[in-house]
Image (tube, rainbow, N blue to C red):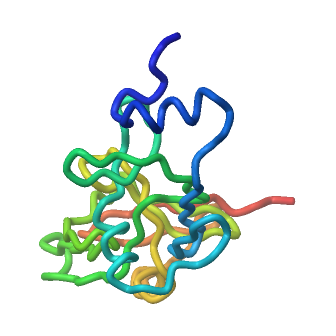
Amino acid sequence: MENDYPELPEYIQELIRSGEGIEEIRLDGEGNWFHNGEPFTNERIIDFFNRSVNLSRDGRFVLHYGEFVYPIVVEDTPVFVTGVVVEGFGPMEDIRLCLSTGDEEYLDTRTLYYRQESGLYCYVRNGRMPAKFKRSPSYQLLERLEESDDTFYLIIRGEKIVLTEKRTD
């Protein structure tokens, strides 16, 4: 049998193969962590999980810390944008993102997109992981929202970033 989870410890792989299952750790669409349906409340554990989120070689989301690797269920995105810092202005402007992982990185405007009913997203970690903007940082960018006859867009670094086309129905 091919190893579906190459990074997972053998005992966890065996539980998955046997059908017994493993205890579920879930990250919901708002960035809240759950263990078998019960919310985590300990901020240190939540922070540890946020900093440990990673992608396995086969494209599954896991908690990864040192030699420890454990599969997780991600309802929307594994990373959240928790803050936005605008530096400079016009074509010299940069937007620094504060992430739930504790990292900061600059927004790659080519990866910015909007999903109806869900909100504003981009890709982080060199384009490897999707990230959802929490409400406050989303509003901070959406203050710049403009519209043409057929699109909604933002102006960042003097560039027009189309988020969505207007519906014609």
Whether residue 46 sits left or right of residue 38 in the image: it is: left
* Camera-side residue of 140 and 158: 140
Say which residue appears at 87% left-offset and 59% top-offset.
Answer: 169
- Does residue 161 sit above or below 147 in this rendering? above
Quarter of the view holding residue 124: bottom left
- Does residue 34 sit above or below 124 in this rendering? below
Quarter of the view holding residue 42: bottom left
- Give percent across and percent down for residue 73: 56, 53
Say which residue appears at 15% left-offset and 82% top-offset.
Answer: 87
* Camera-side residue of 17 and 145: 17
Q: Residue furthest right?
A: 169
- Give percent across and percent down for residue 116: 68, 65
* Camera-side residue of 88 and 127: 127
- Give percent across and percent down for residue 4: 48, 24
Whether residue 52 sits left or right of residue 17 in the image: it is: left
* Camera-side residue of 49 and 74: 49
The number of discs equals 0
- Give percent across and percent down for residue 143: 45, 87
- Does residue 87 sit above or below 73 in this rendering? below
Say which residue appears at 61% left-offset and 58% top-offset.
Answer: 75
Quarter of the view holding residue 131: bottom left
